[in-house]
Amino acid sequence: MTELVRGALREFEPMARHVSWRAGGTVARAFFPADLTDLANFLSALRLDEPLLMVGLGSNLLVRDGGFDGTAIFTHGVLDILRREADGSFYAEAGVASPKLARFVGKQACAEAEFLAGIPGTVGGALAMNAGCHGGETWRYVDRVLMLNRKGEQIIRGPEDFAIGYRHVGLKETSDEIFAGAWFRFPAGDAEVAQTRLRELLERRIATQPLQLPNAGSVFRNPPGDHAARLIEAAGLKGTQIGGAQVSEKHANFIVNPKGNATASAIEMLIGRIQAEVEEKFGVSLVREVRILGEIDRQSMQD
């Protein structure tokens, strides 16, 4: 396979280097494509049953300490094409950071993209989970998307091909495709107003979120008509720690790794404790936003 691709293929790559929690096990194989064509060639040569993990900024992901027996594909800084099309739409490849897209759209005198600056991930991740904040959601502005299937074929699809919900998106009729890029449409606006709004949102994030500590953003979805952070705080869980993982004192829907020594198991156990106590006290089942996968390391659980 190495003769067919131009990117780097590594074995037993530690995911703590690549996820914002700075914790977790290894992946059996890690591929860093040279560009979109290289990724397509890689997929076409891969076994069809090979488990795949798409990784952008690693801000919504935890690989268990026992590792992931599959291939992780890293898109950030590689699938990075971002441009304004002749028809007025914005094309962004999956590895473009969401805040970068927000700034680019704002400078082009278009409005309503500012919320993307509050999403600490890539366009690919935003598409996969319909990421949103500050009243905005990704798929509200999607015109069409570019997909890659396991044969390396490029397919353009519209929103009608997807089941789109709150923090979840899935193809209606197939599941072997990954997001490679998307075309977005935003209404006309004012560049100066957009830049002011971006600064305000960034200042709000800094003031309300523990950005200086390793974290994965919001851990849980907000229940209908409520906020996960309010429920967690009301349950008296702010500051609760398990094995170096801690419920943030600044924002209760964040779990931080303040000393960088928390294991993935500790983080997952703390997530489970939060869910159990909120369920017991308020009868609300908190649903995770973060994706957890891989094998549990039984030895670390015993230690």
Image: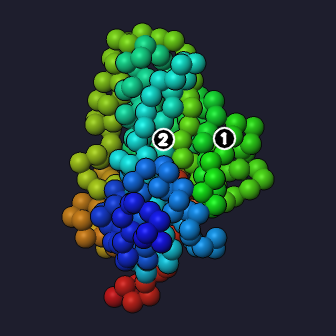
Density class for disc 2 (Cα within 10 Å; few <14, some 14-19, many ≥20) is: many
Disc nearer the start of the sequence (2/1): 2
Horizontal side of 294 relative to 139 (left or right) equals left
Residue appearing at x 34%, y 88% in the figure: 303
Residue 6: x %, y % from top left: 39, 60
- Secondary structure under tag 1 reads strand
Q: Amino acid at mark 1?
A: Ile
x and y, in percent, of residue 36 in the image: 48, 49
- The answer to whether one can see residue 197 in this image is no
Q: Quadrant of residue 161?
A: top right
> Disc 2 vs disc 1: Cβ atoms closer than 8 Å?
no
Q: Kindly identify the residue that appears in the image at 30 percent across and 64 percent down.
A: 17
Three-letter code for the amino acid on which mark 2 is drawn: Glu
Position of 72 relative to 135 (above/below): below
What's the CA distance linking mark 2 and mark 1?
13 Å
User: Where does label 2 land, which residue?
Assistant: 93
Residue under label 1, please give it. Answer: 156
Q: Secondary structure at mark 2?
A: strand
* Location of residue 172 in the rendering, given as x and y in whole percent from the top left corner: 76, 50
Would you place residue 144 above or below residue 59 in this image?
above
* Up-down relation of residue 119 to residue 283 (above or below): above
